[in-house]
Image (tube, grey):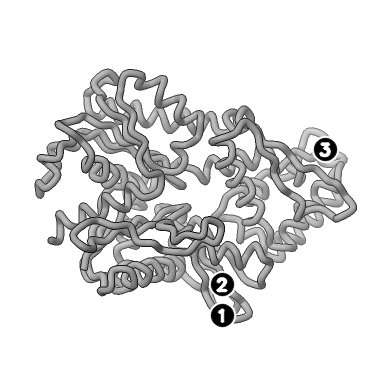
């Protein structure tokens, strides 16, 4: 049986063909909504007491409830970097990142097979246009690594499709006539773009290469926005910019705060040596209370909880002008403590440079095609970060005359991958 699998930085999905149509697999029950959800957060929790591995929302719940173990998120961000060959220690065992990603992909496969009622043997995996910007050898290594992982978890035939092209094929199911569409997919780890001609009459063609006028992408996405928002709103409360007592122009080393604000680097800060180094730095700083908060985060292994609160605020700010960050877990009960307010204006300023880089890449996509903005008939958007007001404003200002279709933020790529699997394997 065939499927399309979108292993995402923040969330993952699987699409299968069942009852003659592409269907998204309900992957996990969400107690907050009372429903089975078609997204599985790309998270693992290694339970140190039971030695079980939990995935998705359940993994995050075990972590936030304070159970003894290790949470890992944003594993896809490792692909396309030189960290791919590194490992990480879980209790007494060192796991490769291939192992860790493999555990997660295996769980996706098992959940999808339970829904389909049959083994899944053929898969089209989604991939960004570039796993790594400007490093073709790392890009090829990342794809090869994902193929190897997919084979090891039991897929017999493995192929790939660019994620924005898959999203285009999902949108094509609702197209009347022929359209020249620009697909904008701003996900958790990358922003990817495809300029493509779409028509229902062409959807079953074996070769669509003549319809694809340009593909481009940049390694910027929602987790980068999270990091910048965290640096602007939270990290100053933990000691970022606090100066040395005897060196008023020199402040706390910034790399601690950048790592703490970066999902896939948080766990490195839990090493005992890091805490000892920060304790030594604390004695040299002009202010000690913010450094105490930083040490509380690291001692309690609360970095992912902190990042999750920033992510929640970002999502809230897609709908409201301001929201409060709940940092009460850092503070003593008697200390009212700082509970910062994040605003849309602060968020927009924090992510402005990255957003501008994203849209420079959009412009480069048009240059690749030889077409101008006025030639674009339709803008199709997918990926969670396309809900951010500044992203939407940039799209509107650049393409005021184009029809704008907002796709499913989290499922368009997975459904398109399932459609591509039907084209390739059936």
Which label belongs to residue 247?
3
Q: Please tell me whether mark 2 sits on a helix, a strand or a loop.
A: strand
Which label belongs to residue 51?
1
Residue 197 higher or lower than 258, as above or below? above
Q: Position of residue 257 (x, y in %)?
A: 67, 47
Residue holding disc 2: 46
Q: Residue at x 86, y 51 (%)?
A: 283
Q: Please tell me whether mark 3 sits on a helix, a strand or a loop.
A: loop
Residue in the foreground of this view, choosing between 24 and 100: 24
C-alpha span from label 1 to label 2: 7 Å
Dot in front, 3 or 2: 2
Kindly tell me whether residue 158 is visible in this rendering. Answer: no
Q: Residue at x 65, y 56 (%)?
A: 305
C-alpha span from label 3 to label 2: 42 Å
Q: Residues within 10 Å of mark 2 (few under 14, many from 20)?
A: many
Dot in front, 3 or 1: 1
Q: Residue at x 82, y 51 (%)?
A: 282
- Residues at circles 3 and 1 in contact by the CB criterion of under 8 Å: no
Q: Residue at x 61, y 52 (%)?
A: 308
């Amino acid at each position: 049986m065939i499927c399309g699998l979108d292993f995402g930085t923040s969330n993952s999905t699987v699409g299968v063909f069942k009852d003659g149509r592409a269907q998204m697999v309900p992957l996990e029950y969400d107690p907050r909504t009372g429903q089975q959800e078609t997204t599985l957060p790309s998270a693992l929790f290694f339970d140190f007491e039971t030695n079980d591995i939990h995935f998705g929302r359940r993994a995050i719940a075990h972590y936030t409830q304070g159970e003894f173990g290790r949470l890992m998120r944003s594993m896809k961000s490792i692909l396309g970097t030189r960290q791919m060959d590194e490992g990480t220690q879980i209790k007494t065992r060192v796991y490769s990142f291939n192992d860790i990603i493999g555990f997660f992909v295996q769980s996706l496969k098992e959940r999808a097979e339970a829904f389909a009622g049959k083994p899944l043997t053929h898969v089209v995996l989604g991939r960004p246009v570039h796993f790594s910007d400007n490093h073709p050898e790392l890009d090829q290594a990342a794809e090869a690594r994902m193929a190897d992982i997919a084979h090891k978890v039991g897929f017999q035939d493995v192929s790939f499709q660019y994620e924005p092209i898959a999203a285009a094929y999902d949108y094509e199911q609702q197209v009347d006539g022929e359209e020249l569409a620009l697909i904008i997919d701003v996900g958790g780890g990358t922003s990817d773009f495809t300029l493509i001609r779409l028509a229902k009459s062409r959807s079953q063609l074996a070769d669509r290469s003549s319809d694809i006028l340009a593909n481009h992408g940049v390694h910027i996405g929602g987790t980068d926005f999270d990091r910048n928002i965290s640096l602007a709103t939270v990290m100053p409360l933990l000691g970022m910019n606090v100066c040395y007592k005897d060196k008023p122009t020199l402040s706390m080393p910034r790399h601690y705060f950048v790592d703490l604000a970066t999902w896939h680097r948080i766990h490195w800060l839990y090493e005992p040596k890091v805490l000892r180094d920060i304790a030594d730095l604390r004695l040299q700083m002009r202010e000690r209370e913010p450094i105490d908060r930083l040490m509380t985060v690291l001692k309690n292994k609360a970095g992912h909880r902190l990042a999750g609160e920033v992510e929640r605020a970002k999502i809230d700010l897609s709908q409201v002008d301001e929201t409060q960050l709940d940092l009460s877990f850092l503070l003593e009960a008697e200390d009212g403590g700082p509970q910062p307010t994040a605003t849309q204006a602060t968020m927009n300023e924090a992510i402005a440079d990255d957003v501008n880089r994203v849209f420079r890449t959009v412009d480069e996509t048009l240059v690749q095609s030889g077409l101008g903005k006025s030639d674009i008939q339709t803008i199709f958007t997918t990926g969670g970060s396309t809900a951010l007001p500044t992203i939407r404003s940039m799209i509107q200002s650049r393409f005021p005359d184009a029809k704008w279709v907002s796709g499913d933020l989290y499922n368009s790529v997975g459904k398109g991958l399932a459609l591509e699997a039907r084209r390739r394997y059936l």
